Image (cartoon, rainbow, N blue to C red):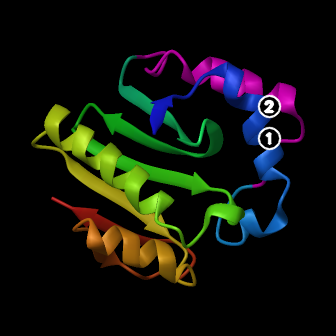
Amino acid sequence: MLEPLLEAHAEALFALFAEPDNWLYLDSTPPPDVETLAARHRYLEARRSPDGSEMWLNWGVLFGGALIGFVQATVSAEQRITLAYFIAKPYWGRGFATDAVRAMVAYLDASFPDAEIVASVDDRNTASFKLLRRLGLTVYDCSDPMNVLLRRV
C-alpha cells in the first residue's frame, strides 16, 4: 500500500536506513539522525518546490501496516518525471518494489499522460534494471556505469 510520505514516517524509515546493504547502489548516504530525516520529510510535505517549478510526489510503501520503504517522483514544469525508490533489504526480491513503482507509474500516467519518465541506476543493480525495463523504460545513456539513465517517453 502507498500513502503520502509524512514527517511521522521519519522514525520508521530511519530505522530501515540503518542496514548498510541498503546503500550498496545509492549515490547518497543515510541521514545522520532521525531529526534530520524528519525535517526533510516536513519540507517534502509541501509537495512542491518553493519556486513552484517542481512537484514532489512521495509515498511511503507499507506492508502489513509497517513502513518498508518509499517511492518518489519529481515532476518538472517541462513534464519530465524523475523516479526514485527505496525498499529495505529484508523485503528485496519479494515484488514489493515492482508493485510500489508500478502503482506510482500508473498514477503518474493518469495524472501526467504526456510526461517523459526517467530514472538513473547503478549498472550493478540488476534488480532495479529489470524492474524499470518491465515498466517500459529503456537505456538512453550509459556513459557513467554508476549512473545509467533510462527513460520512457
Decide: is 46 above or below 133: above
Q: Are marks 2 and 1 in contact (CB under 8 Å)?
A: yes
Instruction: Check residue 37 for magenta coloring.
Output: yes
Decide: is 119 above or below 55: below
Marks 2 and 1, how far apart at CA:
5 Å
Question: Crowding at label 2, few (<14), some or many (≥20) Cα neighbours within 10 Å?
Answer: some
Q: Give percent across and percent down for residue 80.
A: 27, 45
Image quadrant for the C terminus?
Answer: bottom left
Range of residues picked out in magenta: 29-51
Question: In the rendered image, is residue 90 in sight?
Answer: yes
Question: Crowding at label 1, few (<14), some or many (≥20) Cα neighbours within 10 Å?
Answer: some
Residue on which disc 2 sits: 11
Callout 1 amino acid:
Phe
- Residue at coordinates 43% horizontally, 16% vertically from top-left? 51
Q: Name the mark on residue 14.
A: 1
Residue 57, image quadrant: top left
Callout 2 amino acid:
Glu
Q: Give percent across and percent down for residue 106.
A: 23, 45
| Residue nearer the viewer, 102 or 27 | 102
Q: Secondary structure at mark 1?
A: helix
Decide: is 17 above or below 66: below
